[in-house]
Amino acid sequence: MKYKALVADIDGTITHQNRRLNLKAAEMLYRLNDESGIPVVLATGNILCFSHAASKLIGLSGYVIAENGGVVSEGFDTNPYIMGDIKECRKAFSFLSEYIPLTKLDPEYRKTEIALRRNFDLEYAKNVIKSGKYNVDLIDTGYAVHIKSNTMNKGTGLVKIAELMGLNPKEFVAIGDSENDLEMIEFAGIGIAVANSDQKTRSIADIVTDASYGEGVVEAIERLYSCDWNDTCL
């Protein structure tokens, strides 16, 4: 199969461990998008303006999946597609707040989910939410805990953006590192986990790189080039 596009997580994937952008990975993504004609989509749990800024600074075209699939954009000057249900997340947050003190992160910008500071027992919180029977998931990205609709994720975001680009999700290569990348990796034609990925992400990926963080992205793209973006030698 010939792959036609790439979708990559941001934090922990195209960055260094300290979240600083890996410039080698950024340059590789830029050349991939600009010189090789392979569209690059950024996918993140972060907000849309952050996602667009990252895309713009790398030199990409503005295709992004933000808020863990809750917001999808096909360009810098287009109206985003809002895919998630923040009302259910707010109900779950209010319920959970009765048991645990919670701190929201950038709530004024989030359209579909609620992000929380990682300063509480996640397993206890999941049990509390389960008892309330809310249609949400609690996921820990390593940078924040997200209350999000259980009907949307980066995988459903990939399906939507593939549709907007006139592609099939199976024509994408997906690269990620954590729990919120699982569905994206599964829905893509080939899923790649960088070496620093958590065990669950590593276990479902088709390829795990030897290098970590942004260096792993460089390794993955070089490997794809060596196969001429075909799965025959991967």
Image (spheres, grey):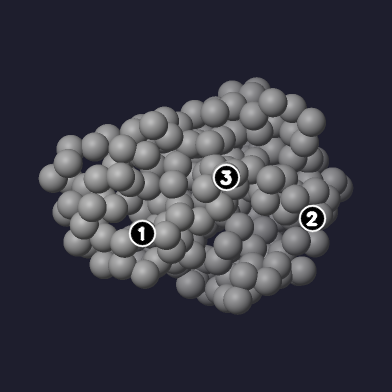
Residue position for label 3: 108
Q: Residue at x 37, y 47 (%)?
A: 147
Residue 58: mark = 2
Q: Which residue is mark 1?
A: 102
Which residue occupies 59% across, 34% down? 72
The three-letter code of the residue at mark 1 reads Leu
* Residue 223 seen: no
Q: Amino acid at mark 2?
A: Ile
Q: Residue furthest right?
A: 35
Residue 103 image point, x, y percent: 42, 60
Please state the horizontal and vertical placement of residue 148, each as a whole percent of the image.
39, 42
Q: Residue 57's quadrant in the figure? A: bottom right
Q: CA distance from mark 1 to mark 2?
A: 34 Å
Residue 225 percent coordinates (x, y) = 71, 55
Contact (CB < 8 A) between labels 1 and 2?
Answer: no
Q: Which numbered disc, 2 or 3, marks the residue that appears first in the sequence?
A: 2
Closer to the camera: disc 2 or disc 3?
Answer: 3
